[in-house]
């Protein structure tokens, strides 16, 4: 048995042996610490779980947030989204809206567009004119065809471009080198210019001009250039232009002057069924010889007859005038579709009988 001694305080000290009171005291302390740690862990877990569910609720709320249901709110919403993505993009959108909303800006934009359009037309015309001066007539014609089709006849360059197109086309046509309007032919025994012209749906004058001939005499084996095109004519009442097409391609543009014999809304499809040089004009029992002051139809006459749905339309004609230069353009001037004598003579030589003519009330 261990030896026990007493100290001055009356307490006992244990040498190598723990007392029961000491054991109990340490165990209670450990339990308190464990409980505190458990509570702290539980609190941390609870806080984490709560935060997780709060975040999920916030995301779900944003996801199901309804979009604005009116135009003003929708524009605001779109601006906010654009600003969030890119401040620069949002600024551009606002500037565009302001420009659209401003009448002054819209007018400026139209003026700027017209300025650019006229600039492009001028560039094309200058290019075509340069090609014409260099005798590159086919290049000139190609440029002007592309230029004139979308143009309005009120454009400042329309008439100069139309005039230049006609000059280029006639230079090519008269040279006999135009693959669009000419074919090669070798004269055979029994041929005459009249027979050849009928066979190729052209005119004696056109063959002579294409070959530089001053007579109608032919030699067997002679090489000829025969103008052969499917000609067609469109008369536009909207701007009084006569468009001559060769094989469905614009060839030349002429001015026409409708007379009192055709009403303002007169239109339809026709064909040239007769042609006459230096015609006599008869009206109200009077006869006016070619070249006389009373002969209002001038030097050439091409009578038109209705076709298709216009078969029963009143007869009409393309003809010249009894004036030098431009026909009388005053309201009520007598006649049908009048042209200057210079223009009608040229057209007369180009187009044969049976040429299709369309008269349009609009463009």
Image (cartoon, rainbow, N blue to C red):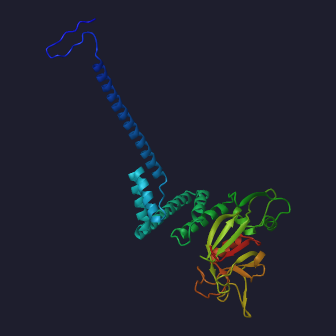
Q: Quadrant of residue 101?
A: bottom left
Q: Is residue 315 found left or right of 157 in the rendered image?
A: right
Task: Check the image and report above or below for 96 versus 23.
Answer: below
Frontmost residue, 28 versus 51: 28
Residue drawn 58% across and 86% down? 330
Residue drawn 62% across and 58% down? 138
Number of marks: 0
How far from the left and from the top, in percent, is residue 222? 78, 57
Q: Is residue 208 found left or right of 330 in the rendered image?
A: right
Residue drawn 42% across and 57% down? 79
Report the residue that reaches farthest toward the left: 8
Q: Quadrant of residue 263?
A: bottom right
Report the residue that reaches farthest toward the bottom: 285
Image quadrant occupied by the N terminus: top left
Frontmost residue, 50 versus 257: 50
Q: Is residue 300 visible?
A: no
How far from the left and from the top, in percent, is residue 68? 47, 61
Task: Check the image and report above or below for 39 versus 189.
Answer: above
Frontmost residue, 284 versus 48: 48
Frontmost residue, 46 versus 199: 46
How far from the left and from the top, in percent, is residue 97? 43, 63
């Amino acid at each position: 048995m261990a030896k026990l001694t007493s100290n001055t305080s009356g307490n006992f000290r244990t040498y190598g042996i723990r007392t029961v009171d000491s054991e109990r005291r340490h165990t209670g302390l450990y339990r308190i610490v464990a409980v505190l740690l458990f509570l702290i862990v539980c609190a941390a877990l609870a806080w984490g779980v709560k935060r997780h569910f709060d975040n999920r609720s916030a995301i779900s709320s944003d996801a199901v947030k309804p979009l604005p249901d009116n135009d003003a709110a929708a524009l605001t919403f779109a601006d906010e989204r654009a600003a969030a993505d890119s401040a620069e993009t949002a600024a551009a959108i606002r500037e565009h809206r302001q420009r659209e909303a401003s009448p002054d800006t819209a007018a400026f934009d139209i003026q700027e567009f017209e300025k650019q359009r006229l600039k492009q037309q001028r560039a094309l015309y200058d290019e075509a004119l340069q090609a014409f001066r260099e005798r590159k007539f086919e290049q000139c014609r190609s440029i002007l065809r592309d230029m004139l089709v979308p143009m309005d006849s009120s454009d400042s360059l329309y008439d100069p471009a139309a005039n230049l197109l006609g000059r280029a086309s006639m230079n090519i046509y008269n040279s006999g080198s135009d693959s669009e309007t000419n074919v090669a032919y070798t004269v055979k025994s029994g041929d005459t210019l009249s027979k050849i012209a009928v066979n190729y749906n052209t005119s004696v004058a056109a063959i002579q001009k294409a070959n530089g001939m001053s007579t109608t005499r032919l030699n067997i084996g002679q090489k000829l250039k025969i103008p052969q095109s499917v000609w067609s004519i469109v008369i536009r009442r909207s701007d009084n232009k006569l468009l001559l097409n060769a094989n469905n391609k614009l060839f030349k543009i002429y001015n026409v002057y409708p007379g009192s014999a055709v009403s303002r809304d007169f239109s339809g499809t026709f064909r040239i069924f007769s042609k006459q040089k230096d015609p006599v004009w008869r009206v109200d029992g009077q006869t006016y010889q070619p070249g006389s002051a009373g002969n209002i139809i001038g030097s050439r006459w091409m009578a038109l007859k209705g076709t298709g749905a216009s078969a029963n339309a009143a007869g009409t004609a393309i003809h010249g005038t009894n004036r030098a230069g431009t026909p009388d353009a005053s309201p009520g001037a007598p006649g049908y579709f009048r042209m200057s004598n210079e223009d009608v003579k040229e057209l007369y030589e180009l187009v044969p009988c049976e040429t299709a003519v369309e008269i349009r009330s609009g463009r």
